[in-house]
Image (spheres, grey):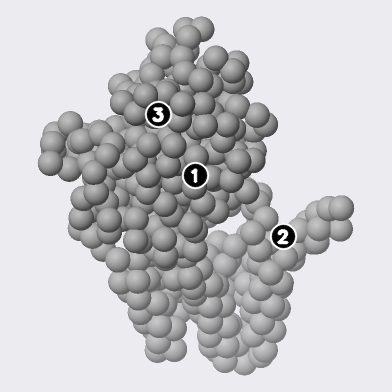
């Protein structure tokens, strides 16, 4: 059972009346964001080391507990040792750490004691030196026995620093921080102003890290502009998602009124808004809503393509477009079902990608050809996914 260890000790540098762990970050508090990273890495118990309990911290702890994990607050290593299973490995994040899912998940699967490090020459503010011209980069995977060792020290010892010292003495493995992580927002931050900037960098990393050409080359550039504004204004993921769904319905109505190209573009914009709403919901730990908005993208894309194919067939006086459109939706749905949570390859199709291709050819005046080409693309995606499933043991 993997346990997580968080710290809410240090005050914010520019807000001495507030803990750094409770500063706003991407629509939540920093410690809630850290807890989300730990839970995504497989942690089932979170220990939070506190110096004092503030209203902001109490609210954050309550919200973390709603995610289905055990959350305990302690003030010393002895209390932490009493809460932990003696054989549970501990994934520790530094006080004020900002990082990404990929880094925390990578550290969670390491064996034995290990420290995420950077060369001292590249160390940012708050990175503690651990010898060998290296500095700790804020993430560690430790044996619970390290906490028991610190518990034997006087009470006034700093728990985080002491754990690092014992880990170094036990010759913990050094894992080098990826060179692009700092650009992605990784660092220890205790100032509200600069934490906001790191939050923007992490948001961009979350969106840009998605696989699939549509997410990478269409959604990500839009998200770079829109997400920081939405987060700064406290926009809820449900509100953005509802706007996306409304645009999808408007697109369907527009297609029905004989403006298919405009209707498809409206539906595509609705899918992008739903994707942004899904990201915002995920940041606020509303996983069911994020999943629902992702599913809604498929629904909007499928309905738009079917309605478009129906009216194209009506104008042409034959059912060719409708048959192709129906096949496209069915094959695309099967491909999405087969992919599920697997890592999506860059060239694979997705509901929004199919809708974009159909819309482009509708604008160019080749609606049936666009439907046929997109259906062939969906078929190729499904064939490759099935082949990979067959080869998977």
The residue singled out by tag 1 in the image is: 82
Local secondary structure at mark 2: helix
Q: What is the number of the mark on residue 309?
A: none
Closest to the observer: 147 or 362?
Answer: 147
Mark 2 to mark 1 CA distance (whole Å): 52 Å
Q: Which tag, 1 or 3, sits closer to the chain's start?
A: 1
Coordinates of residue 332 in the picture (x, y in percent): 66, 70
Residue occupying the point 81% across, 58% down: 389
Q: State the image quarter where residue 253 is shown.
A: bottom left
Q: Is residue 300 left or right of residue 85?
A: left
Q: State the image quarter where residue 77 is shown.
A: top left
The residue singled out by tag 3 in the image is: 160
Coordinates of residue 250 in the picture (x, y in percent): 37, 82
Q: Is residue 316 left or right of residue 77?
A: right
Local secondary structure at mark 1: helix
Coordinates of residue 386 in the picture (x, y in percent): 80, 61
Closest to the observer: 357 or 296?
Answer: 296
Looking at the image, is mark 3 or mark 2 nearer the viewer? 3
Q: State the image quarter where residue 200 is shown.
A: top left
Residue occupying the point 35% across, 75% down: 242
- Observer able to see residue 68: yes
Looking at the image, is mark 1 or mark 3 nearer the viewer? 1
Q: Is residue 342 left or right of residue 56?
A: right
Task: Say if 372 sits above or below 205 in the image.
Answer: below
Mark 3 to mark 2 CA distance (whole Å): 48 Å
Q: How busy is the neighbourhood of tag 1: few (under 14 within 10 Å), some, or many (20 plus)?
A: few
Coordinates of residue 372 in the picture (x, y in percent): 67, 70
Mark 1 to mark 3 CA distance (whole Å): 17 Å
The residue singled out by tag 2 in the image is: 381
Local secondary structure at mark 3: helix
Residue occupying the point 76% across, 58% down: 385
């Amino acid at each position: 059972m993997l346990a997580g260890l968080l710290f809410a000790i240090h005050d914010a540098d520019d807000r001495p009346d507030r803990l750094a762990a409770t500063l706003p970050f991407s629509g939540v508090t920093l410690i809630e964001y850290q807890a989300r990273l730990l839970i995504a890495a497989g942690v089932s118990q979170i220990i939070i080391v506190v110096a004092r309990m503030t209203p902001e911290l109490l609210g954050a702890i309550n919200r973390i507990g709603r995610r289905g994990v055990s959350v305990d607050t302690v003030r010393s290593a002895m209390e932490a040792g009493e809460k932990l299973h003696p054989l549970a490995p501990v994934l520790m994040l530094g006080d004020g750490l900002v990082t990404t899912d990929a880094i925390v998940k990578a550290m969670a699967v390491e064996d034995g004691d290990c420290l995420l490090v950077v060369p001292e020459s590249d160390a940012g503010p708050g990175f503690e030196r651990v010898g060998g011209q290296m500095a700790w980069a804020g993430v560690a995977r430790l044996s619970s026995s390290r906490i028991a060792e610190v518990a034997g020290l006087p009470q006034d010892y700093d728990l985080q620093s002491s754990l690092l010292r014992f880990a170094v003495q036990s010759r913990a493995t050094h894992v080098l921080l990826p060179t692009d992580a700092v650009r992605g927002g990784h660092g220890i931050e205790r100032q509200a102003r600069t934490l906001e900037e790191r939050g923007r960098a992490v948001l961009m990393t979350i969106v840009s890290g998605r696989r699939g050409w549509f997410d990478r080359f269409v959604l990500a550039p839009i998200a770079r502009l829109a997400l920081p504004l939405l987060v700064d204004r406290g926009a809820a993921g449900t509100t953005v998602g509802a706007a996306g769904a409304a645009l999808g319905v408007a697109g369907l109505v527009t297609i029905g009124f004989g403006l298919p190209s405009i209707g498809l573009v409206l539906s595509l914009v609705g899918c992008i808004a739903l994707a942004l709403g899904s990201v915002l919901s995920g940041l606020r730990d509303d996983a069911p809503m994020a999943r629902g908005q992702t599913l809604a993208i498929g629904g909007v894309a499928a309905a738009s393509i079917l309605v478009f194919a129906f009216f194209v067939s009506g104008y042409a006086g034959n059912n060719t477009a409708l048959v192709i459109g129906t096949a496209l939706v069915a094959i695309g749905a099967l491909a999405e079902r087969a992919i599920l949570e697997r890592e999506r390859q860059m060239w694979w199709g997705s509901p929004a990608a199919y809708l974009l291709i159909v819309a482009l050819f509708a604008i160019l005046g080749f609606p049936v050809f666009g439907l046929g080409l997109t259906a062939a693309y969906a078929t190729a995606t499904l064939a490759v996914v099935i082949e990979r499933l067959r080869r998977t043991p």
